[in-house]
Image: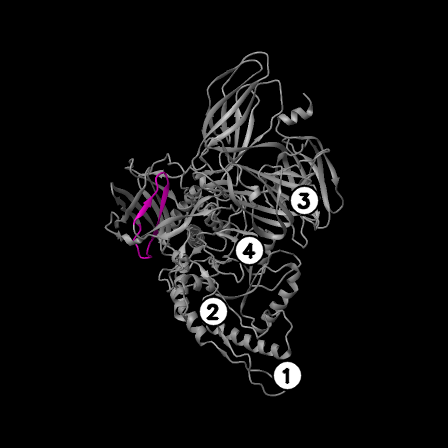
Amino acid sequence: MTMLQALLMAGTLLAGSWEVTDSGEWNQAEYVAGGDGVEEMHFTGDGNGKSAMRRHCVLEPDSLYRVGFDLLGTMEHREWPIGTPYVELPFQRLELWEYPTRWRCFVKLCRSPLDWTGDGYLEIGQENHTGSAAFRQVTVEKLHPIKLTCGDDLQLGDREAVFGNTLYANSELLDGRTAGLNRRQELAGPDASVTWEYRLPGRKFVAAEWRINGRNLRLEASADGETFLPVAEHAADGKSYRLPEGSLGGSTLFLRLRAGQEGPGSFQFSRLSATFDGPPLEARGRSFYAAETPETDRVTLSFQQLSGGTSTDHYRLIGRVYNPTAAASTVKPELVINDRAVFRGETLTVGPQEQRFFPLDFALPESGDLTLNLQADGAVAQRAYVFIPSLYDASYGALLPGNDDNLTLWTADAGWRVGRHRSLPAAEAPAVKVALAKNEAESVQLVLASEHDQSDLQIGLSALDNDAGGQLPADTVEIRMVDYLFLPVATDRQGAIDFWPDVLAPLSGGITLRGGENQPVWLTVRIPAETAAGLYRGTVTIRGAGTDRTVPLEVEVFDFALPDTLHCPAMTSLQKRYIEECQKAETPADKQAAYDQYMQLMKEYHLSPYEITPYAPIEVDWQPETTGGPAAAVDVPVDFSRFDAEVERVLRQYRFNRFVLELPTPPGIDRLNEPLTPFQERMIADVYGKINRHIVEKNWQEIAFVYVWDEPHPSAFPEVDACLQRLRRYAPDLKLLVTPFWIQRRWEPNLDIWCFLSHHYVEWAAQRCRDNGEELWWYVCTGPREPYAGLFIDHPALELRTWLWQTWANRIDGVLIWSSTFWCDANAPGYPARDIYRQPLVINESGGEFGNGDGSLLYPPRAAYDPSVRVPLPDGPVPSQRLAMWRDGLEDYEYFVRLQELLADRGSMLPPAERRDCEELLTVPEAVSYDLFAFSRNPAALQAHRLKLARAIEKLSKMNFPENH
């Protein structure tokens, strides 16, 4: 066996040794042979140069490759332009914008062009990166995509689905056949192209809309793959086009991109929605990526077809066993998933030079990255890779007692997205259970399912009693319905084209069930601060025609209370324009009343809006009377009366712990970095001095801050400094906040609050803030996307709760999400409100995508989009599952704060070993969050640690100091 054959059988196409291609005094590449046999490649950079290594790799045209590697790195600082570590095949460079400080496995897919020829290589290294990067366990595998067979002959892959009479397909370059692309994946020549093929056997495409985002592209479509008709000359950004009738009418549809007339074409994404004839269908795609195995003289197993429903966890594999030997062989195939679950097939006898096909049924109950190994003793195995979105996770939940054919009830943690069609759980639970502190809210899901349609089911709650005679009234528990939104575009690979739960709608009337579907009910328990601790028991009842069910509900109240105002500030924007428009508020009184409803919800979820006095600003008369010469002092009239009254009302009523102080500017001046006339300078000095003194007199200087600049580019740093200098000169007691998009060592502004993008967090920058006595916040805005914790509907619901655990782990003082009411169609003139129930995806000004639910953690009432309703809506905002997770994370953060305070105050009273155990609880377990990239999407570990925190708090709270303390 040759060396290349051995490498192939080990699952990698790499051959030969690593060769240094770039290395020098300032940018170094070094090979390290580890003592455990694991080779490592180390690279350092000074931000202006390259260090790299290269290795031979067997590559073929029109093929999909999986590049896998472990990476750890450091970032000394970020300058502009910015470089990164990278991996590169001859036809594609993959830049690595993540910097794990501990080894983490990365996987990247790329496709070779149709016309690829020549020798191949894999190069790794860094270019213009300031810091270090280390690689190990580097592999390259050729993959064969297998689309899931849905029904008899319909095959759908990742990012493809059929709902009703529409095929939805969200494509990337690696999904199609490519030709002539350069290393940066640009369509660089007249023959360069990308082609996608879609098939619906037995149906005919009758209409289609194609949305494309890119630059300088020629769009073409065909019904047969031979004759292509022009669709459009696409100049730039994102736009939708109708396909010509001549490209429709068949069961296949081809879409092709070519470079336009203005040089290379670039491509970001393709979105197809194509309608077809015949009865409606419902099918969700999935791609399994099987690693190709070399031909050998041994019995070989391989994946041939995969079928089943992706709404459940059950699948069927059609496998092939081939015996190239001269003697019969007995084989018992088995499928091993992530080295844990094993599914075995029937024993097969395969004759000489014979192949046989066999079925093997299996389940994929867990979500995330899964590796499937098809194997048997003495046979060459084949593996396949698949990613299961969290919506299809079937590993959680518990059946409740008393289920029958008419109605099945089960319960699930609030951190799960319950798919409409996911299978019933195997575990059982005696009751719906919630555990929480006094003055806290915690939610749980009660899931209703039936094999047939039911309507007008009524749900009710009893009071909850404890053994000591205490009682929680029934209205301690709030009931909401979990509504689903159809997402035709996935935000990233965590998502899927499907109906996703997120809206926590008010319960009005009865519950309607559709046969074969889950319907979660959202139960939120809110415990008053004066409630006695203990275990409270009550019931939930569901009644309707032929249904009368009662299930136990247990609420444990911990023996401590959370404060009214939590330690971790959490802020978001409430954009009054869209609140007014969607609440149909026109008069000043109606507008204020509508805005108050949203501030009330903010209070209930421990959030502070940026804007607490949108209708009562500080009023300035910028035309003061002046006397004296050109340098005379000015006295600008400033009226605080309406502003003061509103701030006092809002703080008293809603107890917000921070707000943004909107500083007025003279007419014609937008920002304080702009050149000012001497007279304008004197006016600003006078007005800001008065505001500064007034805020101090009101004792608001610790909760009010000025949001100076949003995401300044490094080129704008001098302008930001000019703003900061003026503010420090004229209003020295006001807190100043900036959200720097890039982090640089050379920029050291005089700030009170730094607020970084969460995925741009680096420890050296954070520590500099701490050393300077500055507050350290972080935020999410149109990202980050997978693998980080984010705010998207089609991400695991737990992520925003986990984000607050990461906030504690990284010693962050506050959190911010850019908006909760961005109900705007930014791609339409005038930015009108959009129906976010029908269009949850945010499309920006240039036709790009911000992601599903980005900036919209709240929903307006559905009547907002009813044109027949013309009066102000009495119903207020509707929360989301994501908002509830953010609230729960803020309350969890408070558990850590409370335990830390108690240990500082009473820890000396504990035995040393017990004190160490309590101190260890202040560290976020790796099972909850290993780092910013790797964290659990399963709430179990988080809930287990939360309970340990609660028990430790209870114990320390009850301890009494000795009399001589």
Residue 25, given in percent of the width and then of the height, sits at 76, 46
Mark 1 crowdedness (10 Å alpha carbons): few <14, some 14-19, many ≥20: few
Amino acid type of disc 1?
Ala
912 vs 45, nearest the viewer:
45
Mark 2 crowdedness (10 Å alpha carbons): few <14, some 14-19, many ≥20: some
Spatial distance from mark 1 to mark 4, Cα to Cα?
47 Å
960 vs 925, nearest the viewer:
925
Spatial distance from mark 3 to mark 2, Cα to Cα?
57 Å
Q: Residue at x 51, y 28 (%)?
A: 305
Mark 3 crowdedness (10 Å alpha carbons): few <14, some 14-19, many ≥20: many
Task: Answer above or below: position of 417 versus 847.
Answer: above
Query: Disc 3 designates what residue?
Result: 187
Query: Disc 4 designates what residue?
Result: 844
> Which element carries disc 3, helix, strand or loop?
loop
> Which element carries disc 2, helix, strand or loop?
loop
Spatial distance from mark 4 to mark 3, Cα to Cα?
25 Å
Q: Identify the mark nearer the N-term, 4 or 3.
A: 3
Q: Identify the mark nearer the N-term, 1 or 2.
A: 1
> Which residues are drawn in magenta?
510-533
Is residue 530 found inside the magenta-colored segment of the image?
A: yes
Query: Disc 1 designates what residue?
Result: 631
Amino acid type of disc 3?
Leu
Spatial distance from mark 2 to mark 4, Cα to Cα?
36 Å
Which of the numbered marks, if any, corresponds to residue 10?
Answer: none
What count of labels does the image hold? 4
Q: Residue at x 59, y 83 (%)?
A: 633
Amino acid type of disc 4?
Asn
Q: Residue at x 70, y 45 (%)?
A: 188
Foreground: disc 2 or disc 4: 4
Query: Disc 2 designates what residue?
Result: 700
